Image (cartoon, rainbow, N blue to C red):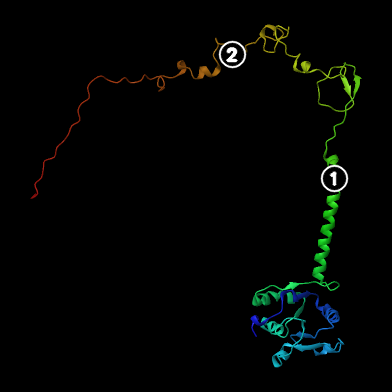
């Protein structure tokens, strides 16, 4: 049978993910929902033993080998309990009906679905039924619900948390108060402060007073700069040391003086002056030529 002969509509062909231990209970649930339909339950192995566990007159249990012997079995709905290694066998199952087809797939069966979808050239719709969710779906759903709750909590309490962060991060300066003066007349404050723009009574200085520097005043204002030589009378004059006197030679001058050099010292010999006499021309000797016969 070819894929082109499948007449089942897309919305009537579904996959119900579940755990392997839930397949029997899920099968009973589906059979109870579709009592008015002729149901054909198919599996890769022989499942005739399930006839005693499910008491229903509209259900028939067959295997893939039974369909090869009797391919003319028709029904209203097919329920596949598993998948075979050959995806063509699943296509043969679908040719037994024209209305509904359901697949109970555990984790192992879901890994083989892509082969069937590639063969049929269409995807299969997955539908998770209530109270039959697989363990992997429950974990993902709980994680998604937890994430949704945390995002909602963060959104509602964003302003409150921002205010707490600002208070924690803000650098609150300690207010310093003027307490009076000490014995030297300097102001005393309660906290440490690096500000010096205040008077001795603790009041703030004006902008003009801040710009003015009483330490350095011009000559017109009656002040003197540190480099003013007219007002440097308190400094001692520069005194020369004994080794700075120019009339005495230093000890090392006596050792290297010209008077102490010997007559044979090369440093006392005068340099040779270039003579003005003309130079003799160089002699050139010419050898006699030899013949080829010699």
Viewed as shown, does residue 97 lie left or right of 251? right
> Which of the labelled discs sits on residue 133, or is there none?
none
Label located before the other in sequence (2 or 1): 1
Q: Which residue is mark 2?
A: 244
Q: Position of residue 121 (x, y in %)?
A: 65, 74
Hey, which quadrant is residue 30 in on the image? bottom right
User: Up-down: is 143 above or below 35?
Assistant: above
Element under label 1? Answer: helix
User: Up-down: is 94 above or below 219?
Assistant: below
> Which of the labelled discs sits on residue 159, or is there none?
1
Residue at 45%, 17% in the rendered image: 258
Q: Quadrant of the N terminus?
A: bottom right
Hey, which quadrant is residue 225 in on the image? top right
Q: Residues within 10 Å of mark 1 (few under 14, many from 20)?
A: few
In this view, the residue farthest toward the right is 179
Q: Position of residue 145 (x, y in %)?
A: 83, 61
Kindly tell me whether residue 207 is visible in this rendering: yes
User: Up-down: is 150 above or below 243?
Assistant: below
Q: Residues within 10 Å of mark 2 (few under 14, many from 20)?
A: few
Q: CA distance from mark 2 to mark 1?
A: 80 Å
């Amino acid at each position: 049978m070819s894929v082109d002969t499948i007449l089942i509509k897309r919305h009537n062909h579904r996959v119900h993910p579940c755990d392997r231990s839930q397949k029997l209970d899920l099968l009973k649930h589906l059979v109870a929902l579709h009592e008015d339909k002729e149901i054909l339950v198919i599996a890769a192995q022989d499942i005739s033993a399930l006839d005693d566990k499910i008491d229903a007159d509209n259900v028939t249990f067959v295997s893939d080998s039974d369909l090869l012997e009797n391919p003319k079995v028709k029904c209203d709905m097919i329920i596949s309990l598993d998948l075979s290694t050959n995806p063509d066998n699943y296509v043969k199952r679908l040719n037994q009906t024209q209305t509904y087809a359901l697949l109970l797939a555990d984790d192992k069966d879901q890994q083989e679905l892509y082969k069937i979808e590639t063969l049929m050239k269409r995807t299969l719709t997955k539908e998770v039924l209530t109270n039959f969710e697989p363990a992997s779906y429950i974990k993902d759903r709980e994680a998604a619900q937890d994430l949704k709750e945390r995002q909602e909590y963060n959104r509602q309490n964003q302003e409150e948390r921002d205010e707490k962060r600002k208070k924690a991060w803000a650098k609150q300066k300690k207010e310093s108060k003027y307490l009076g003066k000490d014995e030297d007349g300097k102001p005393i404050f309660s906290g440490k402060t690096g500000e010096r723009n205040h008077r001795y009574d603790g009041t703030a200085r004006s902008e003009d007073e801040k710009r003015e520097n009483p330490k350095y005043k011009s000559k017109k204002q009656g002040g003197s700069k540190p480099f003013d030589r007219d007002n440097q009378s308190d400094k001692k004059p520069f005194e020369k040391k004994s080794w700075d006197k120019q009339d005495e030679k230093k000890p090392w001058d006596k050792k290297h003086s010209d008077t102490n050099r010997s007559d044979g010292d090369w440093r006392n010999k005068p340099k040779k002056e270039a003579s003005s006499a003309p130079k003799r021309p160089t002699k050139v000797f010419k050898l006699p030529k030899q013949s080829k016969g010699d």
